[in-house]
Amino acid sequence: MTLPAHPTPSRVDGLQRAALVAGSVGLAACVAGGFANPSQFFRSYLFAFLFWAGLAVGCLSISMIHHLTGGLWGLVIRRILEAGTRTLPFVALLFVPVALGVPRLYPWASADAVAADEVLQHKSAYLNTPFFYGRAGFYFAVWILLAHFMNKWSLALDAGPDRATSRRLRGLSGGGLVLLGLTITFSSVDWAMSLDPHWYSTIYGVLFMVGQALSALAFVIVCIAALSGEKPLSDVVRPGSVHDLGKLMLAFVMLWTYVNLSQFLIMWSGNLPEEIPWYIRRLRGGWQHLALALVLFHFALPFLLLLSRDLKRSAGPLALVAGSLLAFRLADLYWLVAPDMGALGHSGGLAFHWLDVMAPIGLGGLWLAVFAGQLKGRPLVPVGEPEIRELLDEANGVAR
């Protein structure tokens, strides 16, 4: 059977052009801001990097989950997820400014601070600049290698079902998820939790794992809704598969809430002096308003909306919920890391800086441009999968 050729939807080209313009403008503004206030530049850049890097890693996580579990829901979004994973070499390049800003970002990178702090001295065997760089290189090597083989073997399936290749993908996904769990945990400790080296949480890595997966899922739902009106996605996106994506997003919303609430209750009930200040900083000086917004718009409202079966079966309304969640994922990350970055002014209260807006726009625009370029490199659906072939044949009136 000759598979029909499907050109890239025009919206992908439009997204790439718009993202490149936005990214260039945002990055130029960040560079100008960096000359005026280098410390603030590195703080804002780290915040933006954590979000977009997490989105790429989250795409890898969701892709592996699908290869282990199967289902039409994952086939519909497979190529979008894979395009997200292929941005990881670019994400590694985006890490360079973070590496350069280590002395301005992390207290443990200052020899004077370490000499005056017994806790930093105790942790110096792990929290030191050379080891920090080495671990970062290891994380990116693992992520890029996993993405490479996932993409390579997945593309091979376009020629038709192959049990050996499918087994390799499942095996890689099973072991890969273990590696992802470890690398995400340690990278979150290195890049975010060590901003306050006196504080620690054994559940912190899980916060990042769940948040990254939720960000990736919300992102691909927005993409599916935007592209579902054009071929080939218009032939394969059905209410049932959209419904599955909505149910999965509801599950991740509840899991995010459970993990955050668990950490809060454990630490608050323990009332330990080395743990409680982390929450006190985030529940005073204006930060409590952002915390309340997260409770309302990252959990309560999405939870209630996603209970609706009709909403979950309609790509447009579901994408509105997903887009809102994506915006509040950014707010949640800011609430997690900004209070520890000295970016609050003299009052210690919530104080946004314009670079906190331009950095996510700049990095996000460039990331989306690379993502769109990767999305154009392959068919938007895995045409070798039997379920996808049936849907394409049905849409094109081909008898089987």
Image: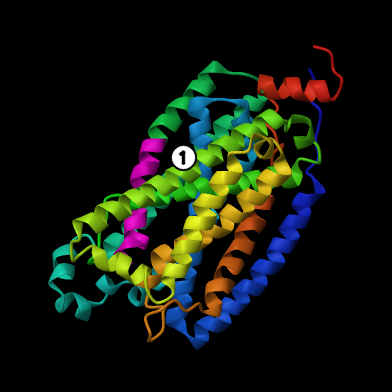
| Residue at left offset 41%, top offset 84% | 345
The quarter of the picture where the N terminus appears is top right
The quarter of the picture where the C terminus appears is top right
| Residue 38 in sight | yes
Rendered position, 372 above or below 392: below
Nearer to me, 338 or 110: 338
Judge whether residue 192 is colored magenta.
Answer: yes
- As helix, strand or loop, the secondary structure at mark 1 comes to helix
| Residue at left offset 49%, top offset 33% | 65
Which residue position holds label 1? 146
* Main secondary-structure element of the magenta-colored stretch: helix
Give neighbour class at mark 1: few <14, some 14-19, many 20+ (Cα, 10 Å). Answer: many
Judge whether residue 362 is colored magenta.
Answer: no
Quadrant for residue 221, please give it: top right
From the viewer's perspective, is 206 left or right of 373?
Answer: left
Q: Position of residue 75 (x, y in %)?
A: 63, 30
**Magenta span of residues:** 177-195
Q: Position of residue 385 (x, y in %)?
A: 66, 23
From the viewer's perspective, is 151 left or right of 274?
Answer: right
Nearer to me, 127 or 297: 297
Quadrant for residue 282, please give it: bottom left
Nearer to me, 67 or 93: 67
Looking at this rendering, what residue extends furthest in the top direction?
400
Rendered position, 326 above or below 258: below
Q: Amino acid at mark 1?
A: Leu
Rendered position, 143 above or below 51: above
| Residue 91 in sight | no
| Residue at left offset 47%, top offset 69% | 289
Q: Position of residue 2 (x, y in %)?
A: 80, 21
From the viewer's perspective, is 127 left or right of 308?
Answer: left
